Amino acid sequence: MNGYELECAIRSNPCIRRRVKGVLAKNNLPKDIMHYPNAYIVNNHTSDRPGEHWIAIVLENNGRAVMAQELILISKERYERLMKQPQPIEPTDPGKDERMKNDHEEKPDNNFTSVIGNSFPHNLKKHATELYRFVLAQDKDVVNHNQQGELVLNGGTITDSNILDIIKYTVSTLQRKTPVGSKEFQDLLHKLDVPKRLIAERKGSSLTQSGGLFVKGNGRRDILPGTSNKKENIRWLKY
């Protein structure tokens, strides 16, 4: 059946005839609607632009035209125009998949920087953030933390530890209570090339670096062991 015969069949059905503006025969249909094997597509009369709204028409054995389904399609001309447009070719990057995989694996663990910025005292934020980033820059098999913040050293998780508590204890002498995992963490820092300014010195510490509470940009205030918060012996270390 050609387009003319289809139009004749449509005209015999008043209900369909009122809604039809033009005919697109089956042999001219875009590929994406070829799954209507027994249907012809006609443009809806209510559509201002041809090809915007179509109706599927099924012809019965007696030649009567029956409307089967309304669908939103693009015109054959636009379809062909889109098919002729060259597809952009992305440059091949052999390491892209591996980097995306690593980024996906690391993202859940690298989410405490904002917590430090929002919850740490103002005079500790800078050094705590720097120490945290230093830790994240190390080999993940050597030092890391899980999503709960528990410290992971050499592949083993230190239960009930918290990386934020450990970092706060490391950069400030005001933290009197030793958090779980702090000794193991400081033993590791002793082996790594950690910046000395990030470590607070404590009595009995295995580290020899001087440190303390960071209170000014031009130096550091060290609270000596045995002194109280009310009366402090302090010394300034210039860097």
Image: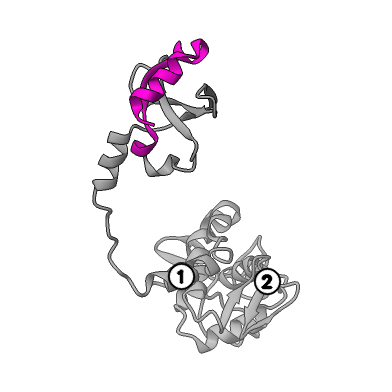
- Name which quarter of the figure residue 156 lies in: bottom right
Where is residue 3? Give x, y as percent.
Answer: 34, 27
Q: Earlier in the sequence, mark 1 or mark 2?
A: 2
Q: Report helix, strand or loop for mark 1.
A: loop
Q: Report helix, strand or loop for mark 2.
A: loop
Classify 166 as above or below 64: below
Q: Residues within 10 Å of mark 1 (few under 14, many from 20)?
A: few
Q: Residue at x 29, y 61 (%)?
A: 90
Q: Name the amino acid type tagged 1.
A: Trp
Q: Residues within 10 Å of mark 2 (few under 14, many from 20)?
A: many
Classify 58 as above or below 221: above
Q: Which residue is mark 1?
A: 236
Q: Name the amino acid type tagged 2.
A: Glu
Residues rendered magenta in the picture: 1-29
Nearer the camera: disc 1 or disc 2: 2
Q: Is residue 2 magenta?
A: yes
Quadrant location of the N terminus in the rendered image = top left
Q: Confirm whether residue 213 shows in the render.
A: no
Give yes or no for contact between labels 1 and 2 (Cβ–Cβ under 8 Å).
no
Q: Nearer the viewer, residue 45 or 177?
A: 45
Classify 239 as above or below 126: below
Q: Which residue is mark 2?
A: 150
Where is residue 125? Give x, y as percent.
Answer: 52, 59
Q: Is residue 66 magenta?
A: no
Where is residue 209? Give x, y as percent.
Answer: 51, 82
Quadrant location of the C terminus in the rendered image = bottom left
